[in-house]
Amino acid sequence: MNKETIISTLIENLETELTKAKAAFETTRTMSQEPDMAQEGKYDTRAIEAGYLAGAQKKRVDELEIDINMIKELSEELPNGDKIALGSLVELKFNEQTRHYFITPTAGGTMLNLDGTPLLVISVFSPIGNEALGMEVGDIFDVETGDITREYEVVSIS
């Protein structure tokens, strides 16, 4: 697996989501300004609700733009060290299964399938991402989720 391919695929996915979010924002914003959305009584809140929805969609557009910029910045300084850091591609073993993860500052939870291999993008703010930072091959760390503690072993870092 190539980190540059992972980043370009991730950016492509985020840009697709951004295009959809922008279209939804524009539709809602336009709808909130339509004459037939004018208040017809003191309890008629259609225009207000559409305005709130447009505001929330604009916030999502802004967040996606920030995410794209953060991933692009990450691509400029990909690590090749012995310790897990932002931009590391890692294999972690849990319950005798090895899974691939890509550590990022954002866009966590994105599942990619590259060359037939599933890869989960995790942010450093996730429980696994946070605990894995600074670990080396062979290190073992625990992640607590609710009442369950899961033990992970670092198999490889690239």
Image (cartoon, rainbow, N blue to C red):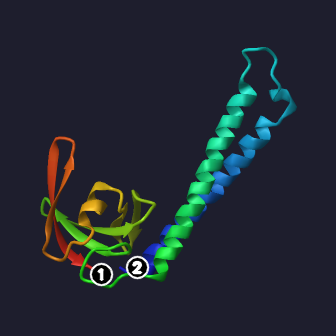
- The N terminus sits in image quarter: bottom left
Indicate whether 55 appears above or below 61.
above
Q: In this figure, which residue is indicated by the disc labeled 1?
A: 158
Residue name at image x 76 percent, y 14 percent: 42
Q: Earlier in the sequence, mark 1 or mark 2?
A: 2
Q: Amino acid at mark 2?
A: Lys
Identify the element where label 1 is drawn.
loop
Instruction: Please tell me whether residue 97 is drawn above or below residue 87 in the rendered image.
Output: above
- Identify the element where label 2 is drawn: helix
Question: Is residue 100 found left or right of 154 in the rendered image?
Answer: right
Q: Is residue 96 left or right of residue 113?
A: left
**Residue drawn where x is 42% and y is 65% of the image:** 105
Image position of 19 with respect to 104: above or below: above
Amino acid type shown at disc 1? Ser
Instruction: State the separation of the CA atoms marked 1 and 2.
Output: 9 Å
Residue 35 horizontal side relative to residue 20, left or right: right
> Residue 118 in the image: x percent, y percent?
34, 66
Residue 104 is situated, as x and y percent measured from the top left of the image, at: 40, 67
Q: Which residue is mark 2?
A: 3
In the picture, residue 125 is in which quadrant? bottom left
